[in-house]
Image (cartoon, grey):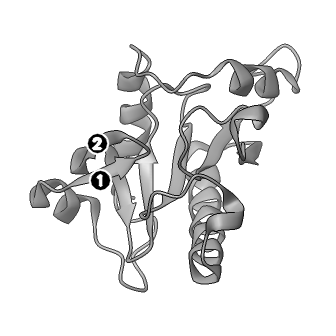
Amino acid sequence: MSRGAILMRGGAISAKALAESGQSFKFGKFSCKATQLFFSSDLTIGLVNLRPILPGHILICPKRVVARVADLEDEELVELWRVARHTAAAMARHVKADGLNLAIQDGEAAGQSVPHVHVHLIPRHAGDLPRNDEIYERMEDFDGRPSGEAASNKRVAEAG
C-alpha cells in the first residue's frame, strides 16, 4: 500500500499529489507541510504525528481550525470519524496491530495540547506498554512539540 492509498474516495487526493502541491495546512497555530500529510479531503486531513506516543501514532483532524468538538459542523464531525474509522482499519491491517486507541482530548482540562480538534489513532500491539492504561498517562504528558521520534513515525506512514 502506498502512503496515500489508505483513503482515495470522495474527493481525497493522494499523498504524492499533496507533497507535490507544496501547500501548507494549519494544525492549531502550527503550519504543517504537505509532506506531513498522508490524507486530505475537502474537510479533513490526516497528519503524521511528529511526536508519536507509540510507533504509528497519527492524527486525523478537520481542515478548519476548531478548538472543541462542540464547535464542529455536523458534516465535519461525520467526516472526521468516517476518515478515522477507515484509516484505523487500514492502519491495523498494515502494521498488524492487535488493537487501536482512538482518542480525542476535548479542551485543555482534558489534556488537549493543541487547540484544534484531532483524533489520536494509535496502533497497539500486545505487550507494547507495561500497563495498557499507561497510554492515557502518555497522552496526558504529550505536549505537541516535535521530537526525534518523528523519523520512526514517518517511516511507518511511508511504508508500503
Mark identifier at residue 159: none
Q: Is residue 126 left or right of residue 71?
A: right
**Foreground: 78 or 65?**
65
Instruction: Please tell me whether mark 2 sits on a helix, a strand or a loop.
Output: strand
Instruction: Give the answer, above or below, for where 3 lies relative to 120.
Output: below
Instruction: Give the answer, above or below, for where 98 lies relative to 80.
Output: above
Marks counted in the figure total 2
Instruction: Please tell me whether mark 1 sits on a helix, a strand or a loop.
Output: strand
The residue at which mark 2 appears reads as 31
Please, what is the three-letter code of the amino acid marked with disc 2?
Ser
For image coordinates 35% across by 23% down, the residue present is: 151
**Foreground: 40 or 93?**
40
Report the Cα–Cα distance between label 1 and label 2: 6 Å
For image coordinates 53% across by 37% down, the residue present is: 114
Please, what is the three-letter code of the amino acid marked with disc 1?
Phe
Q: Position of residue 126 (x, y in %)?
A: 81, 29
Residue at the far bottom in the pictured view: 10
Mark identifier at residue 25: 1
Q: Position of residue 55 (x, y in %)?
A: 55, 29
For image coordinates 79% across by 20% down, the residue present is: 137
Q: Are marks 1 and 2 in contact (CB under 8 Å)?
A: yes
Q: Position of residue 120 (x, y in %)?
A: 63, 44
Of the numbered discs 1 and 2, the one sitting upstream in the chain is 1
The image quadrant of residue 39 is: bottom left
**Foreground: 127 or 104?**
104
Instruction: Give the answer, above or below, for where 144 lies relative to 89.
Output: above
Mark 1 crowd level (few <14, some 14–19, many ≥20, 10 Å Cα)? some
Q: Position of residue 84 (x, y in %)?
A: 61, 62
Mark 2 crowd level (few <14, some 14–19, many ≥20, 10 Å Cα)? few
The image quadrant of residue 4 is: bottom left
